[in-house]
Image (cartoon, rainbow, N blue to C red):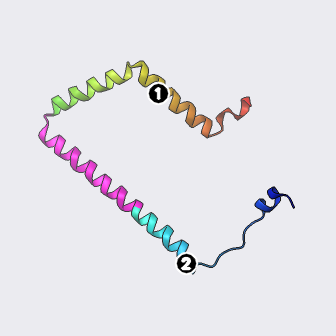
Amino acid sequence: MMIDELLSQPLAPVADNGFSAKIVTRIRRYEQRQLVALSIVVIAVATVACLLLPISLLSQTLNGIVITLATSLEVGIAVLAVLATWLYDRNFFRFWA
């Protein structure tokens, strides 16, 4: 028997008495707690920023950042690269292959 045939054979299931399910559940809970913690931090920082910064200054700053990013060649190239990677990952280019 060739090695490819041996490697393609399914393995026998291993009884782990629910260990795998417990680990997956623990990981999901951990990821959920991390997401909740990050959300709370972002909301808290945004709240403090809105309370401490004048709205007009915040508006001017964001407007300047958006205009700078929109007219930046480097940002445009990066956006195109991310878009092309995403399309490639979704097999969008399979029609030309």
> What separation in Å lies between label 1 and label 2 (alpha carbons)?
45 Å
| Along the line of sight, the residue nearer the viewer: 15 or 31 | 15
Q: Which residue is drawn at the image coordinates 29% and 26% (left, top)?
A: 65
Look at label 2 and name its amino acid: Gly
The residue that mark 2 highlights is: 18
Look at label 1 and name its amino acid: Ala
- Packing grade of label 1 (10 A; few <14, some 14-19, many >=20) is few
Q: Is residue 8 left or right of residue 82?
A: right
The residue that mark 1 highlights is: 78
In the rendered image, residue 57, in percent from the top left (x then y), is placed at 16, 29
Give the secondary structure at mark 2: loop
Q: Which residue is drawn at the image coordinates 23% and 44% (left, top)?
A: 46
In the rendered image, residue 22, in percent from the top left (x then y), is placed at 49, 74
Q: Which residue is drawn at the image coordinates 55% and 78% (left, top)?
A: 18
In the rendered image, residue 70, in percent from the top left (x then y), is placed at 38, 22
Q: Name the N-terminal-most of marks 1 and 2.
A: 2
| Along the line of sight, the residue nearer the viewer: 10 or 6 | 6
In the rendered image, residue 23, in percent from the top left (x then y), is placed at 49, 70
Give the secondary structure at mark 1: helix
Identify the image quadrant of residue 63.
Answer: top left
Which stretch did the figure color magenta?
31-54
Asked whether residue 44 is drawn in magenta, I would say yes
Asked whether residue 39 is drawn in magenta, I would say yes
Name the quarter where the N terminus is drawn: bottom right
Q: Which residue is drawn at the image coordinates 42% and 22% (left, top)?
A: 74
Name the quarter where the C terminus is drawn: top right
- Packing grade of label 2 (10 A; few <14, some 14-19, many >=20) is few
Image: 34 above or below 82: below
Residue 2, label in figure: none
Q: Is residue 51 left or right of residue 16?
A: left
Which residue lies most toward the right here? 1
Q: Main secondary structure of the magenta part?
A: helix
